[in-house]
Amino acid sequence: MTQITSEAIFSDILACGKPEATAFVNGNEKNPRLNGTVKFFAAPCSGVLIKAQIFGLPDGSAPDSTGFFAMHIHENGDCTPPFGQTGSHYNPTDASHPNHAGDLLPLMANQGYAFLAFYDTRFSIPEIIGKSVVIHRMADDFTTQPAGGAGEKIGCGVIWGGESG
């Protein structure tokens, strides 16, 4: 007898489902090879599945690099380089960091590539359409207020409805 688990349901959605929103991420002037997608899928029983696939992240062996990169949803969908118009983290409940709705799990790069999939219940997909996904140069320290001390914005993508923007 096959047991239906959340893992099986989530795996099926990520493998076969169509995202309800997508951000096409591009790098800043210092990181022109950085690119990828962050896709948002509706999950059963509320919540959102997020799948990120990012290429061209800075080399983790560089000075002051850990190979970890903060990833956040920011309140404005303006990814004009150098990404200074993205605003603050998306934070509709005025929560302290790292409990903003826009605080996402960090990316861990291996040879410039990061893949991440996770489940979140702090926002719905309609709430984030038109906002931006931002990748920062450093890891989020999960402490510093208001945004985790993650440093320079090195990648950005506007969140569009659907899978093609």
Image (cartoon, rainbow, N blue to C red):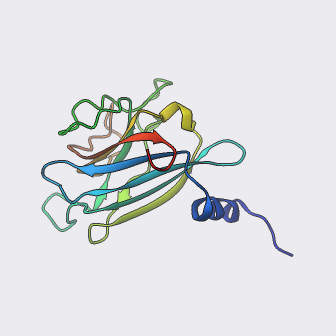
Q: Nearer the viewer, residue 132 or 70?
A: 132
Q: Picture coordinates of residue 58 (x, y %)?
A: 20, 61
Considering only vertical position in the picture, is 88 above or below 17?
above
The residue drawn where x is 13% and y is 52% is 30
Q: Nearer the viewer, residue 25 or 89?
A: 25
Q: Toward which corner of the image does residue 96 lie, by quadrant?
A: top left
Q: Nearer the viewer, residue 117 or 15?
A: 15
**Is residue 86 shown to the viewer in this render?**
yes
The residue drawn where x is 65% and y is 64% is 12
Q: Toward which corner of the image does residue 66 lie, by quadrant?
A: bottom left
Q: Nearer the viewer, residue 96 or 117?
A: 117
Asked if residue 158 lies left or right of residue 48, the reply is: left
**Is residue 122 shown to the viewer in this render?**
no
- Quadrant holding the N terminus: bottom right
- Farthest right residue in view: 1
Considering only vertical position in the picture, is 54 above or below 20?
below
The residue drawn where x is 27% and y is 67% is 112
Q: Picture coordinates of residue 162 (x, y %)?
A: 52, 45
Q: Picture coordinates of residue 3 (x, y %)?
A: 81, 69
Asked if residue 46 lies left or right of residue 165, the reply is: right
Asked if residue 34 lies left or right of residue 73, the reply is: left
Q: Picture coordinates of residue 114 (x, y %)?
A: 36, 64
